[in-house]
Amino acid sequence: MSEQHRDPSASGAPARPAPALSATNKFHVVAHDLPKVDGEGLVLGRPAYTDDLAPANALYVKLVRSPHAFARIVSIDAAVALALPGVACVLTWKDCPRVPYTRAGQGNPEPSPHDRFILDEFVRYVGDEVAVIAAEDEATAEKAAAFVAVKYEVLEPVLNFENALDNPIILHPEPEIHEMFPIGFEPKRNIAAAYHMELGDVEAEIAASPVKIETTVHTQAQQHVAMEPHVAFSYLDVHGRLVIYTSTQNPWHTRRLLGLALQKPIREIRIVKPRIGGGFGGKQQIHVEPFVAMVTLKTGRPARLALTRREVFEATFTRHEMRVSVRLGADPNGHLRAIDMQILSNTGAYGEHALTTFMVAGSKTLPLYNKIAAVRFGGHVVYTNKVSAGAYRGYGAIQGLTGLEAAMDELAHKIGMDPVELRRMNMIHEGETSDVFRIMGEGTEGVAMTIESCKLEECIARGKELIGWDPARLVREVAPGKLRAKGMAIAMQGSGIPLIDMGSARVEFQDGGFFKLHVGATDLGTGSDTILAQIAAEELGVEMKDIVVHSSDTDHTPFDVGAYASSTTYVSGSAVQRAARSLREELIAAAARKLGAAPGDIVYENKNFRSADGKNTLSLDDFSFDTLYHDGAAMQTIAATESFSGEKSPPPYMAAFVEIEIDTETGKVDVVHYAAVADVGTPISPMLAKVQIEGGILQGIGMALYENVRYSEKGHMLSHNMMTYPIPSREDVGRITVEIVDSYEPSGPFGAKSAGEIGIDTPPSAIANAIRNATGVRLTEYPFTPERVLAAIRAGAASGSIGSRLEGAGARTAPRAK
Amino acid sequence: MKLTITINGKNELLECAPGEMLTEVLRRAGYVEVKKGCDTGNCGACTVLLEGKPVLSCSYLAARADGKNITTIQGRVDEARRFAQFLTAEGADQCGFCAPGFTLTVLAMRDELANPSEADIRHYLAGNLCRCSGYEGQIRAIKNYLEAQHE
């Protein structure tokens, strides 16, 4: 074979040599820091995202949205809009199949109720879709949308989730809606889902406990604010099939649910996810795809829709607002005997992710403290006339944790114990389990699991060093009116949903000796294409440049449920590992036949096959041409497809410590240092895992301190742009230190667990505990705005709790209270 | 109305509606490296250089750019590629949507500030938001990049 076939790119030239994870790193590609495969192209701005790729002749789609929180559409007059030159169509609820579905983008059957039509006669929040306009250019589409005359019968909305249950105003009286399996769905009571479990006798245990704690916290709706707004375009291909390019986290769920909503066979739909500009759960759901699809099916023309940022705020999804009440029973030495967690969750107008986020609030927090005699969890998820809640990184666990970790710190205060030691005494360790794993899954029963990797002890020990933890010095006055205080929290998540999430991968040997890796997995910008390629390269004994990865196309890549529930590394990564391992065996068997040896006598290393006696060798490169061009009847495509569904969901863990500075004059809280130590197993890319965690922490800090979806009294969203809903900027946080401890998860690919969500979980809890340590007052209303913190300071000053908490108490001036 | 704008050194004759913002006109002309993130001048994804200085093209009237020089990331591609090596070496590129605008601001900062401290860097780039990275990796990348520029 001539040289011209060979790969000419000798130097990929990363900016620095890839450092090993540790001195004992035995891998050559995984557990190394390698640049993301798409990184340079994205920095250079190459066309890659959905809106960059839309056909030039596509119709522009705009949506008429409800100005009312709750209303019945009496009539829609589109005559004026349709008369505008360039308007292609106006579609209303009368043009939609009367089929309820869910936009949730979860498994099949969906654990979310089918309570939504693409368009309906009723609108249930300000921003709910009323009509779909398509026109030749964007300005015309906008103008036409303004000319659609809609008459509404305005209805009294339910805006406060505390009043939703059994309210005489019922959001969903329509007869067609239903649950797919029992989820506690009672729309006549405004209940989207409900759940209850109890193990042991919680009331008896708490009654018998010498120390009792009761705390209630209220967590707010938070927005994802991925930098790329939701976007899709559609067209009919040469076969007449509907093709949709979309910024989705789960192409297959989108295809299946669109098939249902549009009443089209699944085989007639193809979903492609190009690069996407962040998701965080916000693109797990279906928001734009049905509208472009309807226009393309109606007109036969390509159609494109990119939401404005205001639409993303007003009409996509938020985090579920929750009221979390936790009661603890404990012995005076700190030994926990019982935990009771009761939650009211607000799903907004539709029930997407209602049950599952709710259950995760318990299932991914309660197992942290597994040495208890009794545990109870329950409550309701209710409808309100606000924008729907949906999946958002942390997914209930972050909300549940605020209640649990607040209660744990209150217990520590009550018995005068170091909160770190209290947690160490009660927390889960390697080799242990929790009955909660078995009882609570995501919408269904859970899966029993023994924890094989848990380095919480190491995380805590290192975190204490990083922050300089001294339980006797958790608050100090650094300047007049400036308090510095420390707090901490621990957290866990999961790695996919066991026995529900499935991913698959196909690896194919190509001429030139490289490999195509096709995965259904969905890279949101996390770098999953890169780490999946690393896994394949490691198994196949080749370099990263020998793997060409393609992902997320329902026609051309194998099935994957998508990127959510911290699943990609563990579930999709395991599928890639299996496929690459199968292919390696296939390659060795085929090479053995060619070399006239038994497979067991072939040594494969450095991209060469060698017979055991060393007489015959065959390079991967030469073999690739032989198997595709030279070997006559023996020619074949050598490929392997494998799947993986986890039998467990090994949790990653984190211990997080924060130092905050409170201005006692204004109530402003600044994060001086956030030190977090995580157990994510053995990270496939330590650097990408670390950045995931750093980014998660900053989103969590935003939730703790100021991110808040706010409404007017009539249900109009007040926080509908990035001025009224600011996200953290580069100047808003002091220092974030993230370290990853050595850990190895036996069930994961090369020892890996998930890293995507664990970072966001701790900040709301750790910062609350730091403020409590500073002021003596437990803040229970998120976010901790200066107004609320100032009120706490005044309450603390009034009770004298601040002065007594300062080092050298009594000698220092307590903050002034007016 | 008709505009003549020099984009990345090339004279372009472009159509725009009165009141239309520069982002729309650039994207329609195929300069899709200019991203649309927030529509309100907050996120920095739409940053381009106007006569060498960073501006938010989503808040800059296209008509005002008539006769001016606009540079997108594709106009500084060699320097951008150099910076990308440092950014990707930290994994701080993440979803990449903010990266073209962010990188242009980094290049403008390098041109404008001699020896920026970390606080200077954070301040200069405060208008370029990123929701993925938590900024720490980007700060590491910028420091390494600036250090390498001095070598």
Image: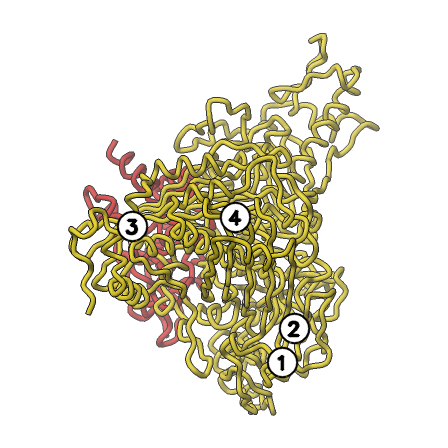
The CA distance from mark 2 to mark 1 is 8 Å
SS at mark 2? Answer: helix
Please report whichever mark, 2 or 1, sits nearer to the chain's N-terminal start: 1
Question: Is residue A40 among the parts visible in the rendering?
Answer: no
Which disc, if any, is residue B6? none
Neighbourhood count class around disc 3 (C-alpha, 10 Å): few under 14, some 14–19, many 20 upward: many
Q: The chain drawn yellow is chain what?
A: A
Callout 4 amino acid = Leu
Rendered image quadrant of residue B97: bottom left
| Residue bearing the label numbered 3 | A485
The CA distance from mark 2 to mark 4 is 56 Å
Q: Residue A665: image x %, image y %?
A: 20, 63
The CA distance from mark 3 to mark 2 is 55 Å
Closer to the camera: disc 1 or disc 3? 3
Q: Quadrant of the N terminus of chain A?
A: top right
Rendered image quadrant of residue A647: top right
Please report whichever mark, 1 or 3, sits nearer to the chain's N-terminal start: 1
Callout 3 amino acid = Ala
SS at mark 1? Answer: strand
Taking A442 as reference, is A708 above or below it? below
Q: The chain drawn red is chain what?
A: B
The CA distance from mark 1 to mark 3 is 57 Å
Query: In the image shown, does A101 or A594 lie closer to the viewer?
Result: A101
Callout 1 amino acid = Leu
